[in-house]
Amino acid sequence: MSGQPDRGELAHALRRAARGDVEFGTAARALTTMDASNYRRVPLGVVAPRDAEDVAAVLTVCRLHGVPVVPRGGGTSIAGQATGTGVVLDFTRHMRSILSVDPEARTAVVQPGVVLDDLRAAAGAHGLTFGPDPSTHSRCTLGGMIGNNSCGAHSVAWGTTADNVHRLTTTGFWGDTHHLARGWAGAPAGLRELVDGHLALLRTGYPTGLPRRISGYAVDALLPENGTDLARAFCGSEGTLGVLTEATVRLVEAPRARALAVLGYADEGDAADAAAGLLPYRPLTVEGMAADLVREPAGLPRGGAWLFVETGGDSPAEARARAAELVRAAGALDGLVVDDPAGQRALWRIREDASGTATRMRDGSEAWPGWEDCAVPPARLGAYLRDFRALLGAHGLHGTPYGHFGDGCIHVRIDFDLLTAGGVARFRTFSGELADLVVAHGGSLSGEHGDGQARAELLPKMYGDELVALFGRFKDIWDPDGLLNPGMLARPHRLDENLRFAVLPREPVDVEFGYPHDNGDFSAAVRRCVGVAKCRTEGTSGADVMCPSFRATGDEQHSTRGRARLLHEMLAGEIVTDGWRSTEVRDALDLCLSCKGCRSDCPVGVDMATYKAEFLHHHYAGRIRPAAHYSMGRLPRWLRAAAPYARTVNALARVRPLAALAKRLGGIAPERDIPELAPQTFRRWFGTRAQPPAQVVLWPDTFTDHLSPSVGRAAVRVLESAGLGIALPPEGVCCGLTYVSTGQLDRARTVLRRTLDRVEPLLDAGLPVVVLEPSCAAALRTDLPELLADDPRAARLADAVRTFAQALEEYAPQWQPPRLDRPVAGQTHCHQHAVLGDAAERRLRTKAGLTGELSGGCCGLAGNFGFERGRDRRRGDGADSGSGPGMGHYEVSVACAEEQLLPSVRAAAEGTELLADGFSCRTQLAQLAQLEGRTARHLAEVLAEGLPGDPLR
């Protein structure tokens, strides 16, 4: 068929043929226009097949309609090969089972949507692991790894994905099944004749001495001397030969103990020169990176670049001895050996986050993939890097190399200007010259992520025209209609076509926040998301928070990346055509908890809480808002009005029919209990006391003042015991949090300007502002200066904000807290983690003898989020991907709490102190944890109780 197919007819035919999810709506298409590359292509629709029969049915329908098909896993491909204009097959929803693990044969059978970390966990139960481990291991899929022939840090020990594949089951575009292993069985007709007719070319046309030769098709794997390995030849084919439905992969024995040697060098050239010399010591990794990519250098040895060299052993002593031997042999400026698992994880996180941090230069300018992973023979890496630096300089470009130095594979993001015609032209010229440089050093254009659209056009430079022509014939044998991921590898698109930035507005978008890290440009803020998808992990790491709604729903549109993609398409206006009024963007943001976790945990600092507030402001401008925006969004106003009648309000709230009516009118979830108002506000209590000269200002936030004044009273007692006099700001101050979180930004700005007017004398006096509620402190620290960038007082107040522990540490450094000597459980507030940091709190707990760790994640209440009734999410025929029935605000809130907070509290031994500095966290525990008389408390309350004298004074 020719021309554009009818989307409605195609969707109808697919729904009749397949049992999986068929989604042709706006949101589903918008979520899959991009992967982690510079490229964007708009699909017709998305299908999530349930099994191999579904895959065959979809391919048959698409062939009859002349529609291309693109297999997609985690969408973390960096060369554009996970984008397409036809039907995208999403394997992450249903085909994600580990079918078997055979510890004796050291194999596992997996479906293509299995996440690598899940396989590693299953294999780990038998002392085994899957060797290749890209930095995206927590969200990349085995299907995507096979499609790209992915590698990772441990390839110096265990090779590429192709080295670890035993057998593959694939479906061709005619719906036919192929079982691929060694030998010709399962090969499509004509393949053997093609190979036999070009033996000389296949034997001489590929570069040698390259552990990371990922570019092009591995047709040479079919040579008889190479074992005629069809499965290996299929690896790295980027979905252009067939669709993988099942894989048998090899597992390797995991070392019982590991140690990490971190070696410091003057620069990355010196580190690269040293890397190849470490390979005879048989390390597990030889990773390199330079100081440009390190946000926090703490824990790294002296140097301007580092090698991360991991060793293994049967015991910690053996692993450490091997690492120490490497340090002695490395010729480094400095080195250290880390053998405790927590220390190793902290250091590895620095390296793994480089794929995100590399997207922003030191000056804040943007850097992009495109030449992310070319590779040269390891012994030539230092020379190549020096030539590469010279080429960057000749073009006036900048980038910081890092990556798999032991394999000669370099990752780098370069500050290409991909927004203007001149910049794109320079990108093209530079790409051609860099390809020549890589080939001159005997290298491969791709050393890990595949060629995709970024490099396939340049393959003739590496392989010559004759072998590249053979690649085209190789693809045609597997895919005679040319509908499997067209434009990749064979007959590729130009590398400067389909750039994702071309559709974005060229003029700044009129917005409310200042976006200081993006030069005030909302488009640049949205562009921050490069698609590495750290937000798509299904479990948190340590104290990490991002992204609780994705972990609750498992749905791409409820991830930080998914929301950023929808905002990108909203700005583009091609799929999402109604701009700020878009219901698709609104629905995706509806389950965002505004936890701010992405602000710190996203490697590129995407700030979805701010983007959500911005969107809601514009979306509801001049329109009726949800009831919760009027009730909880304006909570400070209602609580001030209700304060004189607190006892009456509490009594009425205990009358169930009245409470139910109030919750319905206020947009509050019926499952929630309405918190009681304090009979005496904190401010009123404070006014009854004699006031010594003030050294600090204690901020009477809405929650402390009206709902938990005991926290304020306890803080006063502790601060005064530390010798700090306290002042309160005048009546009417507010951080604006509830207005910001509901997108009422005009009101927030009014409230904040009034606040600045009233606290200005205290700012002039140079007094620090102690804020007990972490979410309010975060609002003052970030939302205030970003909303009122034109008012210098906003930055002054933001700079004056201190948490309770920070104030004690900074202004009463000699004070010693009471020794409490008991374990703790509970949660670090997500805003504390994301904006404020909790180092001072940790040190204060240690001084007080409060032992143990608080959990990470998000409590799930998240201010108004967990109280909101939320939207009806029933899915009709043809609706877009959503969280599905039964996953409204309350259900997501509970799921978030059940992830870390509630289990940690339930598992706490008797006598454990339950800590939660946030009112939301304490409320969530009170309503869900069934604590049986125990209550979660603010750290100030716990410390005050330990002081001598009357704790209630």
Image (spheres, rainbow, N blue to C red):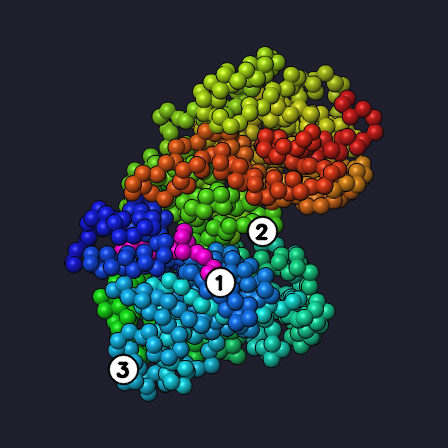
State the count of labels: 3
State which tag comes first along the sequence, 1 or 3: 1
- One can see residue 31 in this view: yes
Q: Are marks 1 and 2 in contact (CB under 8 Å)?
A: no
Label of residue 193 in the image: 3
Q: Which residue is mark 2?
A: 541
Q: Which residues are magenta?
A: 85-100
Q: From mark 1 to mark 2, how far is it between C-alphas?
A: 27 Å
- Specify the quadrant of the image occupied by residue 334: bottom right
Q: Secondary structure at mark 2?
A: loop
Q: Which residue is mark 1?
A: 100
Q: Give the residue type that dot 1 points to.
A: Ser
Is 39 magenta? The answer is no
Q: Is residue 191 above or below residue 776?
A: below
Q: From mark 3 to mark 2, how far is it between C-alphas?
A: 51 Å
From the top left corner, tell me how far across and down residue 119 is, in percent.
Answer: 51, 60
Residue sitting at x 64%, y 70%: 312
Residue farthest to the bottom? 200
Quadrant of the rendering where the N terminus is positioned: bottom left
From the top left corner, tell me how far across and down residue 157 is, in percent.
Answer: 56, 73
Most foreground residue, 384 or 142: 142
**Label 2 neighbour load within 10 Å: few <14, some 14-19, many 20+:** few
Residue sitting at x 54%, y 32%: 863
Residue sitting at x 55%, y 71%: 104
Q: Give the residue type that dot 2 points to.
A: Ser
Q: Secondary structure at mark 3?
A: helix
From the top left corner, tell me how far across and down residue 441 is, in percent.
Answer: 44, 78
Residue 152 left/right relative to 143: right
